[in-house]
Structure formats: structure tokens, C-alpha cells
Amino acid sequence: MSFEPKIIAFCCHYCAFAAADLAGSMRLSYPSNVKIVKIPCTGRVDVIHLLKAFEKGADGVYVAGCLEGNCHYIEGNIWAKKRVKSVKKLLDDIGIGGERLEMYNMSAAMGQRFAEVANEMTERIRQLGPSPLKRNLSDESNDGCEETCSTETPERSTVEV
Amino acid sequence: MIIAEQKPLKEIREMIAPYKKVLVVGCGTCVTVCLSGGEKEVGVLASTLRLADAVDGNEREFVEQTITRQCEDEFIEQLRGNVEKVDAVLSLGCGVGVQDIAAIFPEIPVLPGLNTTSFGRPSEQGVWVEECAGCGDCILDETGGICPIARCAKNLLNGPCGGSHGGKCEISDDTPCAWALVYERLGRLGKLKTLEEIKPAKNWSTAGHGGPRKMVREDLRK
């Protein structure tokens, strides 16, 4: 059976989430592996949110915010970029691999780019294979993560924080 | 505040290796302000350790609790319920916190998750600098409010030395020369004349060289 990764995308309200909306309006398809968590600004994403996503069973995580210089909250995306960078190093240190986490920037008008990023990240994680956590986790221990990583409710499953 | 920084993850993992259930304890005072051992850092460290254990296939449980201060017995008592359920405590407090928890719960290993470095302040966001050495005999009145004991690499009382250049210390261009700062500050205060007085050798017995220090207030004792 081929591996289908669970990917969490933290998308900011003003740009990346709007881009996802536009991708939908444009009838662009992107992999249902990507589950969107809508946030007011990528500056809201903290280290603990990224770690928890992996802890709860995500194979890959990305943060998508406004283009640099165009953040609705001035510099939230710059803070997110720094946090993503530090967590990538942490993931390398503990053997999960920093390449499973990424930061992207896009404007609200970049529906096409949103779909590209979703495809790019899904393909990257497919190549990397399942999260190293899953080698040692039983099926039962994954039960608690439906909210963030269920594969049963694809495109329309958004969670707001 | 007391400044402390998290120990390398590898060192923490080696310390907790023998234990199956670990209580990670944060402190809500100094180390919360220097972003090393508050509730948030407890959450991030516990999550990181859980992930690392899951990758390596280790079965270990982490419990998280943050108390107001790890240096006062009354607050440490609040840990009792959790301490009784675990094999070890990983303290994200300063060295005082680790020792006080160990004193209250002598039957359980208490491990330091931080390295305590200094007394200081945040000079800008994300940067903390040492400004007091706790020498026990403050001379800030004589030096324009700049401490040469903590901020001069040689702890000079009659500086600057020959290593001062352009207002910087010879140890690093990032380090201001404390005595250049003293000179500038005393100039502003119109007290440059005080620099002509030679200060005698300092009595270091108050700085811990006479053994551990203790403050006693008989008026407050029971």
C-alpha cells in the first residue's frame, strides 16, 4: 500500500488562507493530504504548535504566511520564519528531520502558488516516507489526533486557532 | 533577574535516561522572564523530549507543572502530588530552584535542565547581559552606576586597563569597556574628580570567598 502523508498547513487569515480559498474558487486541485489550520497571522504560530503537530502524528508541517514586507501585522511572518528555522534545527537534532517542516510566503492572489506548495510539500514528504515516530507508535496511540490529522475529511477540514 | 539558559538537549536526555516518568518543573519568576524555564519552555522541552523518545522507541512519560517560584518552600509544596507519581524531577529553575526542590523532596532525584549563568537584564529582545556579580559590597555609588566587578573582565577597581580601546574591551569588540562607561557616566554627572582617588584592594570576604553567604534578619525571625 502506498504511503499517504498527513500534512498540517498553518495558514494566515489574510494571505495564505485567502490563497487557499482562491485555489478552491479557481477549481485548482491540491492533495487532500494537506489539512489547513487557519491562524490570524503566522506570528501566532509558536514552537509548541509545530512540535505538537508532529507529536500528534503529522508527517510534515508547513507554515504559509504573507509575502515578506506585506504581513498584515507588519512582521508576524518574519517571526514565524525565525521560529520555523529554529524548529527545523530541533527536528534535525532529535532525528525527525528538519526537511519535514517548511515556511512559505504567498499573497492572497496566489491561488496557483498555494496549490503548487501543497503539491510540492506532499511530494517531498512522500519521498521522505512516514514520520520516524510512526515506526514506534501503535495504531491506538494515533487515535487522539483526528482533529488535526484525519484523512477522512479532506479539502474542507479547516481548524481555527 | 537570574539569567539561565537551557542545557544542550543531548545532556538533558542523558540525565533522564534512567527514569521512566519525569516531572518537568517550570519556575514563574526569573527564568520565565529570560525565556528559559517558564510554562512555555516547559511545554516545548517536554514536547521535544516526547518526540525524541518516540523516534528512539523509548517509553517514558512526562508530566508538566510550573510553579510561581522554585526558591520558596511554600510554592514547591504544590509539586507534591506530581512528585509522588514520578521517578525524577527535571527542574527548569535556576540552581537555587533545583536545590530547594531537592531539599523538600530528598527521596527523589532532581535534575537541572538549565545552566544558571548570571544576574542581569535583557538589553534588547533576545539578549540578556550580566550586570551584577553579587559581590556583597556594592560600590555603584562610586562608579556612576556601572559595576566594574561584573562588567570589567578583570574586575578592576582602578581601571581602565591597557586593553581598553575605543570604548571596547580587549576580550571582544561586542563587550563595552566598563571603565570607559564609568568615565563617560561620571563625566555626565560632573564627578570625574572621583576617578583620581585610588581605591584600595576590595574585601572579597563578602563575595563568597568566606564561604556560603547567609542573611539573617533577627527582627523577622520567629
Image (cartoon, coloured by chain):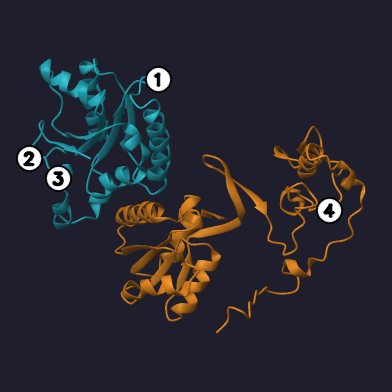
Chain colours: A cyan, B orange
The C terminus of chain A - image quarter: top left
Real-space Cα separation, disc 2 to disc 1, in angstroms: 37 Å
Instruction: Specify the amino acid type for callout 4.
Output: Leu
**Residue A125 x, y percent position in the rendering:** 25, 35
Which residue position holds label 4?
B157
Q: Element under label 4?
A: loop
| Tag shown at residue A69 | 1
Real-space Cα separation, disc 1 to disc 3, in angstroms: 33 Å
Q: Are marks 4 and 1 on the same chain?
A: no
Side (left or right) of B51 relative to A57: right
Side (left or right) of B214 relative to B93: right
The N terminus of chain A - image quarter: top left
Real-space Cα separation, disc 4 to disc 1, in angstroms: 49 Å
Query: Subunit of mark 3?
Result: A
**Residue A146 x, y percent position in the rendering:** 13, 47
| Tag shown at residue A152 | 2
Query: Subunit of mark 2?
Result: A
**Residue B195 x, y percent position in the rendering:** 88, 46
Q: Element under label 3?
A: helix
Which residue position holds label 3?
A147
Residue appearing at x 41%, y 52% in the figure: B41
Residue appearing at x 55%, y 84% in the figure: B222
